[in-house]
Amino acid sequence: MEYDCGAYINILSNKVKSRLDSAISDFGITGVQSRFIFYILTHYKKAPVFQRDIENAYRIGRSTATGVLNLMEKNGLIVRQSVDTDARLKSLIPTKKAEELNERVREILKETDSILTRGLSDENIALFKEVAKKMILNLEEFEDSHKHGCRIE
């Protein structure tokens, strides 16, 4: 059966989520949490990481990020720490538990990417990333134009 681009993206997304959730379930976290851990651990030593950074990096809404981060905090993966310059801002600090999971999470993310790209040339992978970025940009531009009352005809 031939699908449209959106259907292929949904199918691919569901397969990746399922793979990550399955591979990481023994650690007591979800695939989404593993991505957040990876992001936080990669960035927090260079500069404070805030919820909005997660929202921007993964292009998700505030409520989605809040739900995942609240669960991560409840499960002892992160702590939220007030910032001296603005008490309303809370930086996301990984816990020792998150740091201990980091290497295994990185291995699973790398393995999943390897499975995804098996049999694809470097050129194919680069083209896929280029096309995916353009599709994301197209959707974001469309969303932005509709937020401001503009219509694309």
Image (spheres, helix red, strand yellow):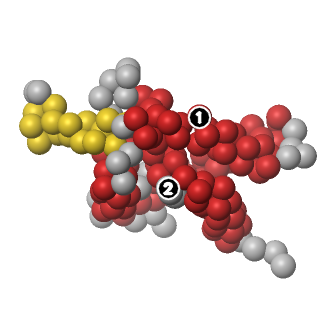
Q: Mark 2 is on which residue type?
A: Ile
Give residue 12's position: percent from left, percent from top: 69, 62
Give residue 92's position: percent from left, percent from top: 30, 39
| Label 1 with label 2: CB-CB less than 8 Å | no
User: Is residue 72 or residue 134 the one in the foreground?
Assistant: 72
| Residue lying at 58% horizontally and 59% vertically, measured from the top left | 25
- Mark 1 vs mark 2: which is more N-terminal? 2
| Residue lying at 11% horizontally and 42% vertically, measured from the top left | 88
Q: Tell me the quarter of the picture where residue 4 sits.
A: bottom right
Give residue 58's position: percent from left, percent from top: 46, 48
Q: Is residue 86 left or right of residue 124?
A: left
Q: Please determine whether, in this image, residue 85 is positioned above or below residue 72.
A: above
Q: Secondary structure at mark 2?
A: loop
Q: Mark 1 is on which residue type?
A: Glu
Asked whether residue 104 is in view, the answer is yes
Location of the N terminus by quadrant is bottom right
Q: Is residue 4 left or right of residue 102?
A: right
| Residue lying at 85% horizontally and 46% vertically, measured from the top left | 118
The residue at which mark 1 appears reads as: 103
| Residue lying at 66% horizontally and 45% vertically, measured from the top left | 108
User: Could you classify mark 1 by the number of other residues whose Cα lies within 10 Å: few (under 14), some (14-19), or many (20 or more)?
Assistant: few
The residue at which mark 2 appears reads as: 29
